Amino acid sequence: MLLRPSIFGGSWINGENAGSRYANLDYWPENSNENIGARGASDDPFTTRREPRPRRSSSTVGTAVYAQLTGWSARSSGFGEHMTGSGKAGSSGNAVETRDRQSGAIIMGKKYRNLIGKITADANMRHAFRRTTLGKRLTTGFLEFNEFSILNLEDLSQAMRDGTYRPGQPHNFKIFDPKERMISALPFEDRVAQHALCAVIEPIFQATLLPRTFACRPGKGTHAAATALQADMRRLTHDAEPLYILKTDFSRYFASIEHGALWRLIEAKISCRATLRLIETMLPRDGIGLPIGNLLSQIFANIYGGVVDRHLQQELGERYWYRYMDDIVVLGQSSEHLRKVRASIEELSRERLGLRFSKWSIQPVSRGANFVGYRIWPTHKLLRRDSVARAKRKIRAYRAGGEHQRLEKFLAAWVGHAKWADSRNLLKSLNVHERSVHHAAHR
């Protein structure tokens, strides 16, 4: 008898049926046996039945009829990651995630229920506490909360579950660099609550954002936005065709967000009443504006702008657009076309979101794109002029005042930002080098 290796299962001595290429894939999961290579008994089906499965007939005809009615087949299985409870929402009504085993994409349910248990779970609360303590271990709020951290976390989670949680009074202060802004700093306990909430709801809302949204997302950010924009500029100017850039900026974005419109987006994804009640303590249903400085505002401000993203890509059919929070860039082959795009998104933003542009411009690619802190051309990137001016002013002030530690921290962050541009000559003129930030700070 010919022996074949069973790479993905199967029998070593099963002749022509051995090995993954000769596996029998037409068995029911509970009837899986040693002849099956690619189909294991423990694998979940690719799609899950919504109704409780009736008793299966022992006949082949009954099996075929049931597979036809439910759309389920053992042949749909793949070799991807096995996820417990994968599939669509079952009879319990709980929306869960599924993973496409071939593409690796996350398929989200339309709405999510029963989230409060995950939010207030012990493991999630401890993780939220650890996230909140980063950089805060010398603050009064941390020291007070940490003294009885286990009891405080238990009390906080209980209050979040039963609806008695009420946020404390935030500490508001202004910053003036690069422009005047009001920052709202929450008490330590409220930051723990927001971290616990966002750890559960953030992946739900992140899945609704399109790939060309770069703000506050894992694997994205300013550098990814600048790189993607420059790559498309190079591709579109490769054949020397004309290219124009539409740049828009919303006026007072966080302060102009309407709570009513935002709550419609929230309730489109979450139907857990306890979770909605918890969110309502942090974000009232009526009013305008989100406070700058807390985690929940970043997530909600990002999904608020997602309405414009879907309008650009799905309704206008634009392929080359980029958004970083309230800054939007669109590439087009003609200025007339970009004027129509601007008018369309301006009308949508005004009527549906209550937003208006503070400034906008349409210019040829030879002028470059001013986006995410860089001036971007197909051939090179430079830092923005106001960014360089602020950096020079801070470096002079820190060196004159002998504040070497603050200068070292600033240079470490700023040089990390500057190295993504063509800034070698600039750093040399400032006596700053990436490999010698510590020495440059003490000059």
Image (cartoon, rainbow, N blue to C red):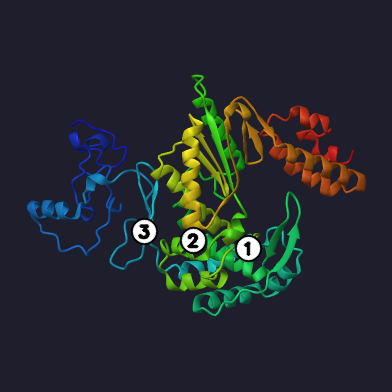
Which residue occupies the foreground of this view, 339 or 89?
339
Depth check: 299 or 327 in front?
Answer: 327
Q: Amino acid at mark 2?
A: Ile
SS for tag 1? loop
Disc 2 to disc 1, C-alpha distance:
19 Å
Q: Which residue lies at the image location 11% right of the left edge and 53% below the top edge?
A: 65
Is disc 2 surrounded by few (<14), some (14 to 19) or many (20+) residues within 10 Å?
many
Residue at position x 30%, y 52% in the image = 43
Residue 128 falls left or right of residue 178:
left
Q: Which residue is mark 1?
A: 291
Examine the rendered structure and indicate whether residue 352 appears above or below residue 389. below
- Residue nearest the viewer, comparing 120 with 12: 120
Is 117 rendered above or below residue 206?
below
Circle nearer the N terminus (2, 3): 3
In contact (CB < 8 Å): disc 2 and disc 1: no
The mark closer to the camera, 2 or 1, is 1
* x then y, percent, for residue 296: 57, 61
Where on the picture, by quarter, is residue 234? top right
Q: Quadrant of residue 393?
A: top right
Q: Which residue is mark 3?
A: 110
Disc assigned to residue 128: none
Residue under label 2, please give it.
Answer: 201
Q: What is the distance, in whole Å, between disc 2 and disc 3 at their CAs? A: 13 Å
Query: Pointer 3: residues within 10 angstroms few (<14), some, or many (20+)?
Result: few
Give the amino acid at mark 1. Pro
